[in-house]
Image (cartoon, rainbow, N blue to C red):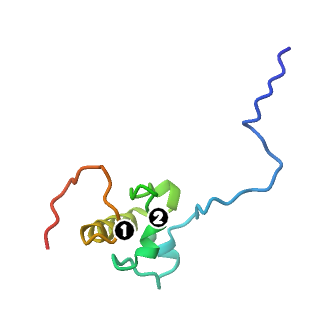
């Protein structure tokens, strides 16, 4: 009677890679440039809602995450990426 049918601990199947690299992609590949004009690249680091993905999802190191966040904000500023509902925390100044 105590047999649980919950299969939350399901194992044995194939390991699924949810594109969550162990290392920072920018540290790993120095040729990748974080640039607000590279929207295809930036899009990989934002959710469908346009929010910046947390580091634990992307594996990006703190340094590059900051850089990335800055470029994403720039991209939003010139409407390459959608704005989110989150309020602006800092004024953008050139
Ligand atoms: Zn890095």
Q: Check disc 1 and report its element: helix, strand or loop.
A: helix
Query: Ligand 1 lies in which image quarter?
Result: bottom left
* Residue at x 41%, y 55% (from the top left corner): 49
- Residue 4 locus on image (x, y percent): 80, 24
- Callout 1 crowding tier (Cα within 10 Å): few <14, some 14–19, many ≥20: many
Query: Which numbered disc, 1 or 2, marks the residue closer to the eye?
Result: 1
**Which of 12 and 27 lies nearest the eye of the viewer?**
12
Residue located beneath label 2 in the image: 60
Q: Which residue is mark 1?
A: 68
Question: Is 92 positioned to the left or the right of 54 in the image?
Answer: left
Mark 2, Cα crowd under 10 Å, few <14 / some 14-19 / many 20+, is: many
Residue 71 screen position, x and y as percent: 32, 71
Does 30 sit above or below residue 84?
below
Q: Mark 1 vs mark 2: which is more N-terminal?
A: 2
Decide: marks 1, 2 in contact (CB < 8 A)?
Answer: yes
Residue 82, percent from left and from top: 34, 62
- Secondary element type, mark 2: loop
Q: Residue furthest top?
A: 1
Cα distance, mark 1 to mark 2? 9 Å
Q: Is residue 32 left or right of residue 87?
A: right
Cβ of disc 2 within 8 Å of ligand 1? yes
Residue 94's image quarter? bottom left
- Counting from the top left corner in percent of width and height, residue 41 is at 46, 74
Q: Which mark is residue 82?
A: none
Q: Residue at x 44, y 64 (%)?
A: 61
Work out whether 85 lies above or below 94.
Answer: above
């Amino acid at each position: 009677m105590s047999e649980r049918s919950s299969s939350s601990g399901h194992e044995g199947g194939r390991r699924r890679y949810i594109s969550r690299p162990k290392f920072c992609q920018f540290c790993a590949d120095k040729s990748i440039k974080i640039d607000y004009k590279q929207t295809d690249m930036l899009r990989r680091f934002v959710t469908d809602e346009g929010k910046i993905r947390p580091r634990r999802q992307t594996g990006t190191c703190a340094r590059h995450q900051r850089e990335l966040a800055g470029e994403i904000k720039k991209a939003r500023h010139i409407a390459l990426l959608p704005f989110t509902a989150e309020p602006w925390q800092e004024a953008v100044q050139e």
